[in-house]
Amino acid sequence: MDYTPLVMEHFENPRNVGVVENPDGVGMVGNPVCGDMMKISIKVADGKIADCKFKTLGCGAAIATSSMTTELAKGLTLDEGEKLTREQVAAALGGLPPEKMHCSNLAADGLHAAIKDYRSKQA
């Protein structure tokens, strides 16, 4: 399986690993078929994602997509974060092997779940 150099960089040196202290929203997603699990936590300030961290149990692609998603999410408005797609995350990494798109690239879904959690707490 061929990964891009950027996928390997985010796998070997992931950014934003951990949990945001006192998070405003938390999203957990997973794929029972492959076993990948992702937890994304966010801190919101002035309607924007001020901080975003992840914990992921999964393959190298799962870790890389989680890392990239947190990088892309920081500074986005909540509406922009909700529109971030799996395809955009994969493209930012220079692509993913087709067999990794279905399960490893769940991080955007985790971000959406964290935003939904935040919004439900504000209602």
Image (cartoon, rainbow, N blue to C red):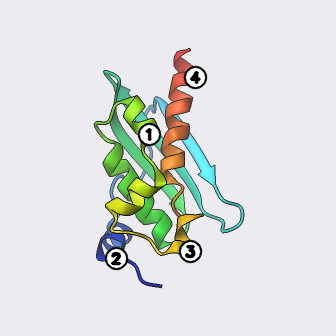
Name the amino acid, label 4.
Answer: Ser
Q: The C terminus lies in which quarter of the figure? A: top right
Residue type at the position of mark 3: Glu
**Looking at the image, is mark 4 or mark 1 earlier in the sequence?**
1
Q: CA distance from mark 4 to mark 1?
A: 18 Å
| Residue pictured at 38% horizontal, 42% vertical | 52
> Of tags 1 and 2, which is closer to the observer?
1
Which three-letter amino acid code belongs to the residue tagged 1? Lys
Element at badge 1? helix
5 versus 26 height, above or below: below
Considering only order in the chain, which callout, 2 or 3, is on the residue closer to the N terminus? 2
Q: How far is the residue under mark 4 from the one under mark 2?
A: 37 Å
Q: Work out how far the residue at label 4 is from the one at label 3, CA to CA, in angstroms.
A: 34 Å
**Residue 72, percent from left and from top:** 32, 48
20 is higher (above) or lower (below) than 90: above
Per the image, the residue denoted by label 4 is 120
Q: Earlier in the sequence, mark 1 or mark 3?
A: 1
Q: Is 73 left, or right, of 97 in this rendering?
A: left
Earlier sequence position, callout 4 versus callout 2: 2
Q: CA distance from mark 1 to mark 2?
A: 24 Å
Q: Earlier in the sequence, mark 1 or mark 2?
A: 2
Cα distance in 3D space between marks 3 and 2: 14 Å
Residue 38 image-quadrant placement: bottom right
